[in-house]
Image (cartoon, rainbow, N blue to C red):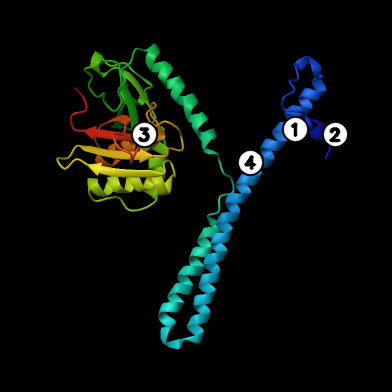
């Protein structure tokens, strides 16, 4: 260990060192030391996660080999044991190849989204827009935007602009009620990935359940999600807990944005979305999505 490292680690925590007590070279040395330590800890965390995936892969492989060996020793149960062997070996290979090569810490993603949310919040205040989010099916000319736009109206008694008007960032229509801004939702790329992952749901109930599962299992945006569909139609409510991107009630948060964008995309109608604190302990926030009577 170098002297600089020993000096930093052995200094009395109660001793305050002013900037004037250290030379510029010493300050730069301490900054570099802290940066290296931060990089080392990050690498350790990523290595730990990769090792957990690989240990799981080894466990499945051992299970598959044991089942294969048992099948050879017990001929009357070969069909079942060979099936277990195949499942174990296949899962081992799949787990190994799905081991993440890079892990992005949740606080990093939260800060990136936070900068976007602060910028849009300032835009909404500067243009005197409403605290309303409407996700509208519209052409985006982007393969990762899911053909949905987030419309933020200027008028309280608003109407949905036409598809051509929504292609512009600033929607300036002849009808003042259709004016506002049109944004690409943060959840649009997630919806694109969601649609690539499997078959489309046949009913709104199935779709809501799939969206809740995707929030937890597919994208790991929350620890828990529970979907409820209005029996009369026109509304989906999803309670969430343990967000990876901080408070869910911020503007166009990925959790609510994903749900609303997916509904607008699959149902082909404008979807209004609001997020409020939950009333029970099973969830922290509730994502309310409604359609049918979105525009006043």
Q: Is residue 143 visible?
A: no
Which residue is drawn at the image coordinates 77% and 25% (left, top)?
A: 28
Label 1 Cα crowd, 10 Å radius (few <14 / some 14-19 / many 20+): some
Q: Which residue is mark 1?
A: 33
Q: Is residue 97 visible?
A: yes
Q: Which residue is mark 4?
A: 42
Q: Position of residue 112 (x, y in %)?
A: 51, 30
User: In the rendered view, would you say 100 is above or below 264?
Assistant: below
Q: Position of residue 264 (x, y in %)?
A: 28, 36
Residue 13 vs residue 186: left or right?
right
C-alpha gap between disc 1 and disc 3: 40 Å
Q: Which residue is mark 3?
A: 257
Badge 4 vs badge 2, beta-carbon distance below 8 Å: no
Q: Position of residue 16 (x, y in %)?
A: 73, 20
Q: Secondary structure at mark 2?
A: helix
Q: Secondary structure at mark 4?
A: helix
């Amino acid at each position: 260990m170098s002297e600089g490292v020993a000096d930093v680690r052995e200094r009395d925590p109660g001793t305050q060192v002013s900037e004037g007590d250290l030379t510029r070279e010493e300050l730069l040395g301490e900054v570099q030391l802290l940066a290296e330590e931060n990089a080392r800890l990050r690498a350790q965390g990523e290595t730990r996660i990769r090792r957990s995936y690989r240990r799981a892969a080894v466990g499945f492989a051992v299970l598959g080999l044991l089942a294969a060996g048992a099948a050879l020793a017990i001929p009357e149960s070969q069909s079942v044991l060979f099936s277990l062997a195949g499942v174990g070996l296949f899962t081992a290979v799949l787990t190994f190849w799905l081991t993440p090569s890079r892990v992005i810490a949740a606080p990093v993603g939260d800060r990136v989204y936070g900068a976007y949310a602060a910028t849009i919040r300032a835009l909404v205040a500067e243009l005197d827009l409403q605290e309303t989010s409407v996700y509208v099916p519209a052409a985006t000319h982007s393969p990762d935007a899911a053909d949905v736009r987030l419309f933020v109206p200027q008028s309280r008694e608003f109407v949905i602009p036409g598809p051509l008007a929504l292609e512009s960032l600033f929607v300036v229509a002849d009808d003042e009620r259709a004016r506002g801004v049109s944004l690409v939702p943060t959840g649009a790329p997630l919806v694109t990935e969601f649609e690539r992952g499997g078959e489309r749901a046949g009913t709104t109930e199935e779709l809501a359940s799939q969206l809740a599962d995707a929030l937890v299992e597919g994208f790991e945006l929350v620890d828990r999600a529970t979907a409820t569909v209005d029996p009369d139609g026109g509304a989906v409510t999803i309670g969430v807990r343990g967000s990876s991107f901080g408070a869910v009630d911020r503007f166009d948060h990925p959790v609510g944005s994903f749900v609303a964008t997916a509904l607008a995309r699959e149902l082909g109608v404008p979807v209004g979305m609001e997020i409020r604190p939950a009333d029970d302990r099973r969830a922290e926030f509730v994502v309310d999505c409604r359609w049918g009577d979105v525009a006043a």
